Image (cartoon, grey):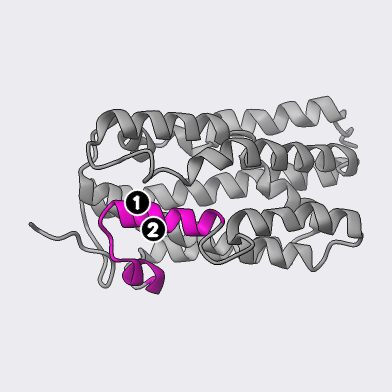
Amino acid sequence: MTVQPLSPDELEAALRAIGAERYHNLHPFHRALHGGTLTRPQVQAWALNRYYYQCRIPAKDATLLARLPTAELRREWRRRLVDHDGDAPGTGGVARWLKLTDGLGLDRAYVESLDGLLPATRFAVDAYVEFVRDRSILEAVASSLTELFSPTIISERVSGMLRHYDFVTPETLAYFQPRLTQAPRDSDFALAYVREHARTAEEQAAVLDALKFKCGVLWAMLDALDYAYVVPGRIPPGAFRPDPA
């Protein structure tokens, strides 16, 4: 039986349905983070582990940039590298994330060393970088479509953390404000690309699977944090251990 391809609107609806079901704003750890029920050490563990994701995003984008066939596409995707790496020392999203870990009282050299990562964080993020490097351009672009859902989670994160944690300030959360405009810009481009280029049923299935995979990466990272730092609280050897004081 031949499967008929979806229309572009149907494909977009299917992508958005994946986000509604699988995006990590639904994860219990995320809800605890925004709801103010985490301790300062648990928030530190989140920020430290999330740093690995943030600092590997430019590497992920660079692997795709190298494979894009036209100058137009490369110019578009190159903006993501500047967004995260900046165009001078101390600028860009990775630098702003370090201001977050600074503000939470983490030693910057320790954060940048990556010595305190949970093993599952490293595995999940590395799997995402490898996915973008090794899969088709269409699948790689589609995997970025979690950005469709990020403005909502960013707004929740900023308002919730400022409301509930006295150790968090607007300056600490400076990373997030630019993402409220960058993420929609990037997701608009990626969505238009997928709508145009995912024409066959096979291509569309690959696109949907790519987004499911990326949602799984983000979910797995929170699973690991929840297991290590909430319940049952089993921190693996070598991972960040909060100061008992």
Residue 181: x %, y % from top left: 63, 36
Pointer 2 local density, CA inside 10 Å: few below 14, some 14–19, many at least 20: many
Residue 154: x %, y % from top left: 49, 35
Q: Is residue 69 above or below residue 208?
A: below
The residue tagged with tag 1: helix, strand or loop? helix
Q: Does the magenta segment cover residue 109?
A: yes
The residue tagged with tag 2: helix, strand or loop? helix
Residue 24 visible within the image: yes
Residue 15 sits in quarter: top right
Question: Label 1, on which residue?
Answer: 46
Q: Is residue 177 above or below residue 139?
A: above
The span shown in magenta is 92-114
Question: Label 2, on which residue?
Answer: 49
Most common SS among magenta residues? helix
In the image, taking residue 209 as reference, residue 154 lies left or right, namely left
Residue at figure coordinates x 46%, y 62% from the top left: 52
Tell me, for residue 22, which label it has, or none.
none
Q: Amino acid at mark 1?
A: Trp
Residue at figure coordinates x 57%, y 41% from the top left: 179
Residue 157 sits in quarter: top left
Residue at figure coordinates x 66%, y 29% from the top left: 16
For the C terminus, which image quadrant? bottom left
Q: Amino acid at mark 2?
A: Asn
Q: Does the magenta segment cover residue 100?
A: yes
* Dot 1 and dot 2 residues touching (CB under 8 Å): yes
Residue 167: x %, y % from top left: 24, 42
Residue at figure coordinates x 48%, y 30% from the top left: 155
Residue 128 visible within the image: no
Pointer 1 local density, CA inside 10 Å: few below 14, some 14–19, many at least 20: many
Query: What separation in Å lies between label 1 and label 2 (alpha carbons)?
Result: 5 Å
For the N terminus, which image quadrant? top right
